Amino acid sequence: MTKIEHFQQQINDLIKSQQFDGNPKALYEPIAYTMHQGGKRLRPLLALLACDLFGGDTDKVLYPALAVEVFHNFTLVHDDIMDKAPLRRGKETVYKKWNSDIAILSGDTMFALAYQYTLKTDTALIPGILQVFSKAAIEVCEGQQMDMEFETDSEVTLVDYLDMIRLKTAVLLGASLEIGALVASAKKQDVKAIYDFGIALGMAFQLKDDLLDVYGNQDDFGKVSGGDIAANKKTFLLLKALEIADKADHDQLTKLYNSKNPIAEAEKISAVKAIYEKLEIKQTVEAAMEDYYQQAIRFLRNVDASEDKKEDLASFASFLYTRNY
Amino acid sequence: MTKIEHFQQQINDLIKSQQFDGNPKALYEPIAYTMHQGGKRLRPLLALLACDLFGGDTDKVLYPALAVEVFHNFTLVHDDIMDKAPLRRGKETVYKKWNSDIAILSGDTMFALAYQYTLKTDTALIPGILQVFSKAAIEVCEGQQMDMEFETDSEVTLVDYLDMIRLKTAVLLGASLEIGALVASAKKQDVKAIYDFGIALGMAFQLKDDLLDVYGNQDDFGKVSGGDIAANKKTFLLLKALEIADKADHDQLTKLYNSKNPIAEAEKISAVKAIYEKLEIKQTVEAAMEDYYQQAIRFLRNVDASEDKKEDLASFASFLYTRNY
């Protein structure tokens, strides 16, 4: 078993051991449903890897790592209400399976539970962890708000988009790593560097997600293929296409996204994909991803830690970057 | 200026000094709208009074007290979505003035901000404060879930109801006092006693709220009079009435609450109030309130603190108990 597999097993075992079976039942069932559904457990794994990177005791970061995972899942439960998303990881979303009131309140409870998990570590570590966690939590909300506003804003630029995904996705990856480094009492500049590594990795990760939405296999990815196109989401793909398209393609894309007589979904998705193909959008996004990945690796290289352990993180980063789900 | 007035001014000044003016604007405007709307600021005041009671430095509890107030307001923002409440403190609710997506996400941000405020005190105090705060936050969610379930549950008893209001309302009053006591490094049994004082006070406070909904003046109270009756809310008043009513009154109450042809609101409210009057429900609720109030005073009396300072808390409790809004 590799170190990464060992950490993944520890995280999965910890999550399995949490019953989330409080009362009222209707409040906790959606929490257990959400938390026991699987998922990549990316954020807790990053927390453990960062703690290990700086020679810390990874047992002390297990619960704070779980806190980040519960928080992340809470944001998904609330986002799915706002996005009216029917599926998540191939299963019905909480708001769809129950209703939006339950999804609001079970989500709120998950947020509070997340904070409670951050407290299950050495007392001296708690204030630092909570500073990082609370800042990231606020930024994730800001990112989600930007994402919602983009739906009706016709002036969104690629720069706006990158700022949004930094807040909505990357900061929580950065925070996970930072928490791991704090638990290991890493030096200040290393805490900063590993956070920056997480930000760059998070950007690459989100661009991969945007790509998978259009080019991924639905069975692997667990979401409806082309869902972002159907939902008129402004993604890196669309914004890049709008940026480089000639007038005819630009007009057609705008028309496809603004049509008042909604075009049949499948037809719309394939029309948009045809333009993406013509403009070689897939290759452009892959190049941007590669840039972020290389940036992440540069931050990692500057960290004062053993080369072996840096390799663990680098190989995990590369896995994220080549994943198909 | 009395001590209570002085503390109230400190709390109001602190809240006024918080601009809540981050970006995106649409996320923060509802937060500023909610937080600058006024309100009794009951919970932070209790935190300051408890800290002062045990000879603590009240400056150290100001931000944690603000945290509780922000958390409390967050729960109102989310509850108003679930309850479809149009008015709060005489003004449009956030979900009504903006929309429910904004109310969900601004609420989530308030929750994260609340946690951030708890961190603005002596580092050594943070873990203890957060234990109390997170436990209360979870219980408040449980109470709100019970409250929602009661809407469609025809078997709710008075005991269920009292359990619900303990979670939904009383625990946060208890937690506010407990946080004040922790900041003052009070003895363990005194921390417990002041929490119990808060629970009993919270029960009396909620019964007063139930009464004011039916018998309060709308201009003073800031909510639609009889709103609980119109919304088919199961309150202490209704459940007590159902418990002691003869068959004819019981049937009529049940009919009023279950009618499929919704009876005109004003007519329904006055029909229910007529039954309450006949059964002397107002007097019964007042007697129950008095019991809780006396219980609270007994907890307070057992605390090891100066009689003068106990008197400050007792007089504030008595104000809550006789308030008209």
Image (cartoon, coloured by chain):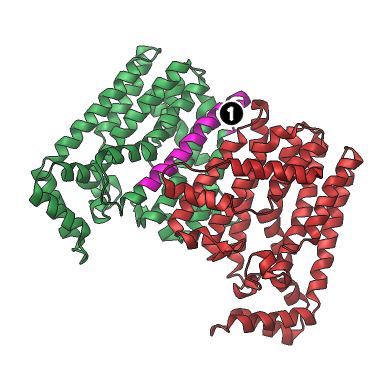
Chain colours: A red, B green
Confirm whether residue B89 shows in the render. no
Amino acid beneath label 1: Pro
Q: Could you say where residue B228 lies in the image, as x and y percent from the top left?
A: 26, 51
Q: Residue at x 82, y 38 (%)?
A: A53
Left or right: residue B234 versus residue B181 is left
Farthest residue to the front: give it.
A1
Image quadrant in which the N terminus of chain A is located? top right
Confirm whether residue A272 shows in the render. yes
Front position in the image: B218 or A296: A296
Identify the chain of the residue marked 1, using the numbered disc in the image: B
Q: Residue at x 81, y 53 (%)?
A: A317
Front position in the image: B109 or B83: B83
Count of numbered badges drawn on the protein: 1
Left or right: residue B133 versus residue B83 is right
Q: Residue at x 73, y 47 (%)?
A: A174
Give the residues in magenta: B119-146
Farthest residue to the bottom: give it.
A248
Farthest residue to the right: give it.
A307
Q: Could you say where residue A68 lies in the image, as x and y percent from the top left?
A: 64, 44
In the image, residue A211 sits, relative to residue B71, either above or below, namely below
Tag 1 residue: B127
Q: Residues within 10 Å of mark 1 (few under 14, many from 20)?
A: many
In the image, residue B47 sits, relative to residue A47, either above or below, namely above
Magenta segment's dominant SS is helix
Q: Is residue B36 magenta?
A: no
Image quadrant in which the C terminus of chain A is located? bottom right
Q: Which secondary structure, mark 1? A: helix
Q: Quadrant of residue A44?
A: top right
Q: Could you say where residue A163 lies in the image, as x and y percent from the top left?
A: 70, 58
Front position in the image: A224 or A160: A224
Q: Quadrant of residue A239?
A: bottom right
Q: Could you say where residue A112 lies in the image, as x and y percent from the top left?
A: 53, 41
